[in-house]
Amino acid sequence: MDEAADLALLDQHLLKTNLLSQRMTGILGQLDTRLSRLDKTIAPLGLQPLTRKAANIDAVLASLSRPGPYRSVSASNPTSSSTPSAVPGTKPNVQGYSLAPTLTPIASVPGSGAATPADETAILTRGPDIMALGEFFGAMDAVTGDLERMWKGFKEGRGGAREAGVRDLSALVEVGFSGIAQLFLKIAREGMGRTYEIDHMLSSGPPTPPNYFPPLPTLLPLTTYTLSLLHPASPRPALPKTESLLAPRYAELISSFADMRGEWMRKSLGVLLGRVEEVDEGGIWEMGRGREKAGGLVALWEGMIVLTEAETLLITTLFPSHPPASLLPQSLSSPLSLLSTAFNPTISTIKRSVSTHAFLAIELYASLQTMSARWEATLTKCLSMTRTPPTGSEVRDMLTALSGTVTTIRGLAMRSFPEFLVDIRTASGGNGNGTGNGNGNGNGGGERGPSAGISDTTHSTLTYLETLPAFEVTVETLLQSSQSQRSWLMGASEAPSPVRSAAEEGGVVKLFVADILGTLIIYLKQRASTMKRVIGQTFLLNNLSHIRNTTAGFNSDIIGPGAEDMLNKAFREAKSAYLSEWTSLIGLLTPPTPSGGRFSGGGGGDRQSLKDGATAFFDRLAELEGVGSGYPLSRQDPDLRDRIGREVEELVGRGYGGFWGRVQGRGVEKCKGRGEGARGGEERMGTGAEVHEEEELGPRPYGQCGEPGEDRIFAAADLRGTPEDVQRRVGAIFR
């Protein structure tokens, strides 16, 4: 029990001891905090040991007691803990401003300031505090004032300790300015933070400097004081020595700040650049991506112009009296290099297929040509506001930053015109997906046989012509800038269209369009000539009709009179060639005149020729039916099918009706319902009461199909329908 009581008592004492220790630790911590605050409070006062002050006082009294124009003032090293006492009757060791442990003597002119040199040394060495800039600026003024007076005396030949004093004071001034520069860059870097919202800037214009650069109010006192040292305003005297010391360090400060601002602007423009890189060029305005690509690239330069204006306002506000001449050009260097490389992928894409991306090149040229003039005017104004002379090579390169890109894109746009004609002439035989034949018989690259559909080349050419009016002014400017008329023909000896001059057609653009259509017609005729005759004629008629219909629906008057006449003439020729196939069909019913002697109307030679003509007619009609089914006139053009169908029906019906009349009275009138249809006997034609199948009953004896004793002229398979039946068969081809 006693041991337990002792242990409990010891625990209580230990607990009390711990509590007392904790309280003592807290008290000591509070004391340490207060001492720290006191040290920070009294540090600017430059308090020194009393022995040091006594030594200074003795040195001053000794100096005053000696005759002479100059008096010495001693101040021991503020970092030293002990100071040698003055020896009466001897020259004391006078020391002043210095950052080194061992100081050289400095002779100071009376009246340099109320604060001691050691106080000012401590303040400048510690560096500026944004909350106590007045104290730092006061110390800096005192040191620079002493430096200028000492420098003036030294230049006047009053040497002595002034050379060493100038050296020490110069080092102290440089240290003080280094503190200002470090604080300036630190606040600027931390204050910029994120990039600016470039979209908001594009929509509302350059923002005010405080909104654009939040650290501006904090940095303005630093820049104002710095400019007062480098460019003191009247009535403050000039500070030549201070200016010579600080000028290179000020240039370093401006260079660092410019690099910082340039990188920040580069990041801000990176948002727009990312959008440009996400856009696919996509051919000739496919899904509008080409225009989006051009718009994104132009927006980059619009953002650059707004940023330049905002940066100029910032510079003139931050450095109101003397804006640095190199700040704006150096700040713009980084974002301009970004913009110059941003166009390289797009230019490479255009170069790979100039004609495919023709309107991307034209759009960029038109936009950037305007943007180049705007950029040059904006930069010239901004350089004037910052008092930067536009004479240096770097500045001249910035003024013409867009000129090289514009020249390159202009050359690509000029190349696109002749290359587009070359692409038409050398196009492969691809057709759309059954556009012209109605049953999916088109091919993609000419590998599955011929097609009568609308050619892919026709589609792409019409798309080009439909887009061209939107750029007519730019295209006209480009074409007129060429030294020769019809430069797009690249010196070809023969023009593809009969139009003779731009004045005759109504402008150089319409002359170019006429040559495009002429080249397309030549290409279509060449392709048609490689096909079977009927298929080629159908192909040519389909494409020319599609061209006429599409160009007639253009919103602009891009087709001149000469080009329109050329199209109409080519269509008439194609239509005539197509109808000639049906004319030749009717020609089969007219037998050639036999070379033998005369024969009676019912002679065997005449009968045989009529029989052969009928057989050839129906065989050819069946062939044309097959071609019309596999390679029809465009089902997308019902007007063409109706017009051509009516003409063919009338032509064939009239021709076959005449043939039908010629064989009247020769026994056929009573056998006219016994033929097989052209579709293999599946459809019987005629209205006679007797239906005779030759396969089953065999040929009927002569005399059974007419008057007694009259010869049978045609077998059942010779005449396969009445004129009405033939017309219906022909009409079915165009349904």
Image (tube, rainbow, N blue to C red):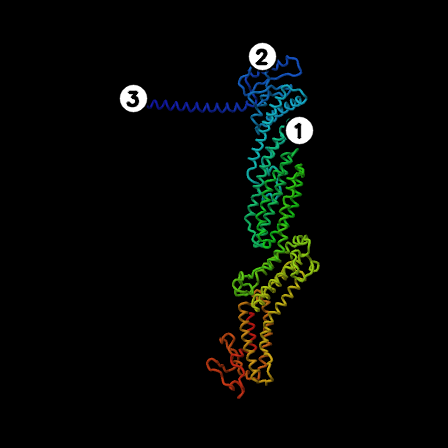
The secondary structure type at the circle numbered 3 is helix
The crowding category of the residue bearing disc 2, from other C-alpha atoms within 10 Å (few below 14, some 14 to 19, many at least 20), is few
Hey, which quadrant is residue 593 in on the image?
A: bottom right
Q: Nearer the viewer, residue 511 or 488?
A: 488
Identified by mark 3, the residue type is Asp
Q: Position of residue 590 (x, y in %)?
A: 59, 78
- For the question of whether residue 252 can be seen, the reply is yes
Distance between mark 1 and mark 3 Cα atoms: 89 Å
Identified by mark 2, the residue type is Val
Find residue 625 and name its label. none
Relative to 400, residue 498 above or below: below
Q: Position of residue 211 (x, y in %)?
A: 60, 38
Q: Residue at x 55, y 19 (%)?
A: 48
> Which marked residue is nearer to the observer: mark 2 or mark 1?
2
Is 25 displayed left or right of 580 in the figure? Answer: left
Pick out the residue farthest to the right: 503
Specify which label sits upstream in the sequence, 2 or 1.
2
Q: Answer whether labels 1 and 3 touch (C-beta < 8 Å).
A: no
Pick out the residue farthest to the left: 1
Q: Answer whether labels 2 and 1 touch (C-beta < 8 Å).
A: no
Relative to 711, residue 495 above or below: above
Find residue 232 and name its label. 1
- For the question of whether residue 221 can be seen, the reply is no
Specify which label sits upstream in the sequence, 2 or 3.
3
List the residue tagged with mark 3.
2
Q: Position of residue 190 (x, y in %)?
A: 55, 35
Distance between mark 2 and mark 3 Cα atoms: 76 Å
List the residue tagged with mark 2.
87
The crowding category of the residue bearing disc 3, from other C-alpha atoms within 10 Å (few below 14, some 14 to 19, many at least 20), is few
Pick out the residue farthest to the front: 596
